[in-house]
Image (cartoon, rainbow, N blue to C red):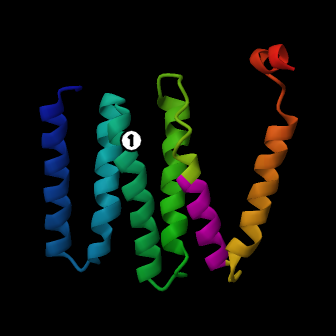
Amino acid sequence: MSDPTRVTGLLLVAGGVLWSVIVATDLDRTIVVPGVGVAFLLAYLATRRLGLLVPAGILSGLGTGLVIATQGGPEGAIPFGLGGGFAAITAIDAVLGDGELVWWPLIPGGILLVVGGSQIAAIRDVGVYLVPAGLVVVGLLLVLRPPNARQEDQG
């Protein structure tokens, strides 16, 4: 089912069904966001198109955090859920993708997981600790990486 028109149609049907269920029941409207994320995930599973996995991860993660936060959970659940959604893009693609790892979602995902996790753990001013730690990690990676052939020719 790689026909874009059919995928779009299925996403619209899923959105309409979800909306109808919310209107007909007492479900909180925040369920829409993860519901749409799941619809994108199903479309990805049907087509294996990365362009559908990205909104699936982002909306599912953000929606999960919203639902948790609106049900009395910690405020940090929102950035933590969004970070988990970004990380899920890489994890799902690593298992089901075409073999070429999509790593970029780990950057915003990692940042959001740390920020949300620090809010959940009630760690104040997390940036005061993370910025110097990040500088040390990046510096060590640069110092410890093996030289490439171009650097050896110049040295």
Residue 87 as seen in the image, left or right of residue 132? left
The crowd level at tag 1 (other Cα within 10 Å; few <14, some 14-19, many 20+) is many
Residue 38 in the image, given as x and y percentages of width and height = 34, 51
Residue 100 in the image, given as x and y percentages of width and height: 53, 24
Horizontal side of residue 143 vs 12, given as left or right:
right
Asked if 24 appears above or below 138 in the picture, the reply is below
Decide whether the magenta segment is chiefly helix, strand or loop. helix
Q: Is 57 drawn above or below residue 102 in the view shown?
A: below
Q: 14 or 121, which is in the foreground?
A: 121
Nearer to the camera, 130 or 61: 130
As for residue 70 lying within the magenta part, the answer is: no
Furthest-bottom residue in this view:
72
Question: Would residue 109 be counted in the magenta stretch?
Answer: yes
Residue at the image point whose x is 36% and y is 29% from the top: 48
Residue 112: which quarter of the image?
bottom right
The residues colored magenta run 108-120
Task: Name the quadrant of the N terminus.
Answer: top left
Helix or strand or loop: what does disc 1 sit on? helix
Q: Mark 1 points at which residue?
A: 53
**Front-most of 146 and 78?**
146
Please tell me which residue is depicted at 48% across the width and 30% down the height of the picture. 96
Q: Position of residue 20 (x, y in %)?
A: 13, 66
Kindly identify the residue that appears in the image at 73 percent across and 74 percent down: 128
Between 9 and 50, the one nearer to me in the picture: 50
The type of residue carrying mark 1 is Leu
